Structures are given as C-alpha cells and as structure tokens.
Amino acid sequence: MSFLFKKICIASDHAGYNLKELIKNHLINKHVSIFDLGPYENKSVDYPDFAKKLAKRVKAKKSLSLKLVELFLKTKFEGGRHLKRIKKI
C-alpha cells in the first residue's frame, strides 16, 4: 500500500470511532503514515463535519483522488442495508 499512498487520512463519526481507532493502530503497526482527522473521543458528533474535513484533504490531492475513485470502482459492492438507498438514485 505504501507505493500508492504517502499518508492516509482517516476519519469517522462516533459510531465508527472504535473501528477507526482499530484501523489507525493497524496502519501504524504496518508503518503507514496516517493523519487522524477525528473524532478523537467516542462522543456523539455530526458525521458531515468529519466527512467535510476528509473531502477537503482528498480534493487537495487530485492524483490521489483519481486513484481512490479507481479503487472504489474496482471494489465489489456488498449491498446490505445500503442497497435500498442505492436503488433510490
């Protein structure tokens, strides 16, 4: 992964806080440089605030943005609870 990313930005909402911390620690143990955009504690937050922070970081790196889009397009959609939302689009 280090050949694709120099630094990985990570963020979540309060519901994803524990998973974010798990992923963050896993990446650190793999010697991947990360930038934690929050939240920094498991308290209720509004996820758009953290999505906006992350989106601004990605927007600033156009080539990285294109690589992330390609990765997204190659990733199999698992459906699940989000399928009904996708069908509305």
Image (tube, rainbow, N blue to C red):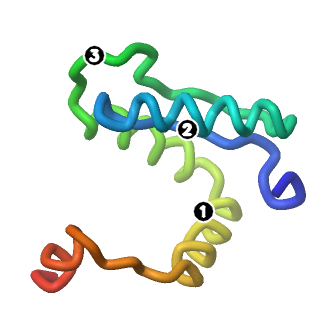
Q: Is residue 21 left or right of residue 85?
A: right
Q: Position of residue 72 (x, y in %)?
A: 53, 73
Q: Which of disc 3 and disc 2 is earlier in sequence?
A: 2
Residue at the image point whose x is 60% and y is 66% from the top: 68
Tell me, for residue 43, which label it has, or none: 3
Q: Which residue is mark 1?
A: 65
For label 1, the crowd category at 10 Å Cα-Cα, with few meaning under 14, some 14 to 19 and many 20 or more, is some
Question: In terms of depth relative to the viewer, which is nearer, 21 or 46?
Answer: 21
Residue at the image point whose x is 51% and y is 28% from the top: 37
Quadrant (top left/top right/bottom left/bottom right) for the C terminus: bottom left
For label 2, the crowd category at 10 Å Cα-Cα, with few meaning under 14, some 14 to 19 and many 20 or more, is some
Residue 8 figure quarter = top right
Q: Nearer the viewer, mark 1 or mark 2?
A: 2
Q: Kindly identify the amino acid type of the residue bearing the numbered disc 1.
A: Ser
Task: Measure how far apart labels 1 and 2 are at the Cα level.
Answer: 14 Å
Residue at the image point whose x is 50% and y is 35% from the top: 20
Q: Which of disc 2 and disc 1 is earlier in sequence?
A: 2
Q: How many marks?
A: 3
Label 3: state its secondary structure.
loop
Label 2: state its secondary structure.
strand
Q: Position of residue 88 (x, y in %)?
A: 10, 81
Q: Is residue 60 left or right of residue 63?
A: left
Q: Which residue is mark 2?
A: 10
Question: In terms of depth relative to the viewer, which is nearer, 28 or 3?
Answer: 28
Contact (CB < 8 A) between labels 2 and 3? no
Q: Position of residue 51 (x, y in %)?
A: 37, 42
Residue 7 figure quarter = top right
Task: Measure how far apart labels 1 and 3 are at the Cα level.
Answer: 30 Å
Q: Kindly identify the amino acid type of the residue bearing the numbered disc 2.
A: Ile
